[in-house]
């Protein structure tokens, strides 16, 4: 006695629609990637011609790229200087000081802020923060202009390297805070209880048990934040 061949179950209407939409979305994404690749290759073909003449700056390649590299590194250093202490403080507050309900709510907010694309922070910095901070720069130049860091003409748009550093710090602060919180929570409970049993205060316990354990994790958080 032979059994009947298995029949393929008929998909419901919703499943068919979902499959069609998924396949269509995948085809659109692949098509866009192919078009981008074709466009880049087409635009790059003149550079592959050995007889093509490439324009160069009078002072050389380093003079053109040097200021860009310096600005990138300097703004990243400013962002780390601003964001690192704040992220450590936020992580410690959530993991060791805040009540459970407040810590949970703050954790959700930080995770949401960490998911915001960097381009959104950039647009906010150009359109909102730079005009807002420009009067502060003017006040610093008027009252503290005798210091070399504040002397000189003030930018009329507020788009300075300090603005870039502050915006970068705001951008990486949620990421570093979330990572610092998780690192602090991984501290062995026995180490914390041992420090408290020896008579240490909560801050002394953090200094002796939490921060040494989290040192490498905080360094990784700073690198991932940038």
Image (cartoon, rainbow, N blue to C red):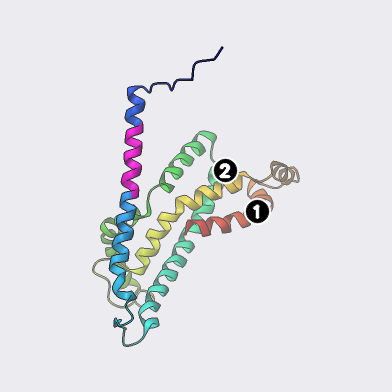
Which region is colored magenta?
19-30
Q: For this view, does 71 lie left or right of residue 53?
A: right
Q: For this view, does 208 lie left or right of residue 50?
A: right
Q: Is residue 147 visible?
A: no
When the figure is inspected, residue 82 is found, relative to residue 153, above or below; the finding is above
The mark closer to the camera, 2 or 1, is 2
Callout 1 crowding tier (Cα within 10 Å): few <14, some 14–19, many ≥20 = some
Q: Does the residue at mark 2 contact the one at mark 1 (Cβ under 8 Å)?
A: no
Q: Nearer the viewer, residue 30 or 203?
A: 30
Q: CA distance from mark 2 to mark 1?
A: 14 Å
SS state under label 1 = helix
Q: Percent from the top left, x then y, of residue 92?
A: 56, 48
Q: Nearer the viewer, residue 15 or 169?
A: 15
What residue lies at 45% left-to-right and 50% top-to-bottom?
Answer: 174
Q: Which residue is mark 2?
A: 95
When the figure is inspected, residue 31 is found, relative to residue 84, above or below; the finding is above
Q: Which residue is mark 1?
A: 207
Q: Percent from the top left, x then y, of residue 213?
A: 66, 52
Q: Is residue 205 visible?
A: yes
What residue lies at 50% left-to-right and 50% top-to-bottom?
Answer: 177
């Amino acid at each position: 006695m032979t059994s009947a061949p298995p029949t393929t179950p008929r998909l419901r209407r919703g499943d068919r629609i979902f499959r069609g939409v998924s396949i269509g979305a995948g085809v659109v994404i692949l098509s866009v990637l192919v078009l981008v690749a074709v466009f880049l290759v087409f635009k790059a073909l003149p550079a592959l011609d050995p007889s093509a003449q490439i324009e160069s700056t009078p002072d050389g390649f380093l003079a053109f790229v040097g200021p860009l590299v310096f600005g990138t590194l300097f703004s990243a250093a400013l962002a780390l200087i601003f964001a690192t202490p704040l992220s450590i403080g936020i992580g410690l507050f959530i993991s060791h000081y805040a009540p459970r309900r407040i810590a949970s709510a703050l954790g959700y907010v930080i995770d949401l802020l960490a998911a915001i694309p960097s381009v959104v922070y950039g647009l906010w910095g150009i359109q909102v923060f730079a005009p807002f901070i420009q009067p502060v720069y003017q006040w610093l130049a008027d009252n503290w202009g005798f210091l070399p860091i504040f002397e000189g003409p003030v930018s009329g748009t507020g788009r300075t390297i300090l603005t870039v550093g502050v915006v970068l710090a705001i951008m990486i602060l949620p990421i570093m805070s979330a990572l610092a919180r998780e690192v602090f929570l991984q501290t062995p409970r026995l180490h914390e209880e041992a420090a408290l049993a020896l008579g240490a205060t909560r801050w002394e316990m953090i200094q002796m048990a939490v921060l040494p354990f989290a040192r490498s994790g905080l360094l990784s958080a700073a690198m991932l934040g940038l």
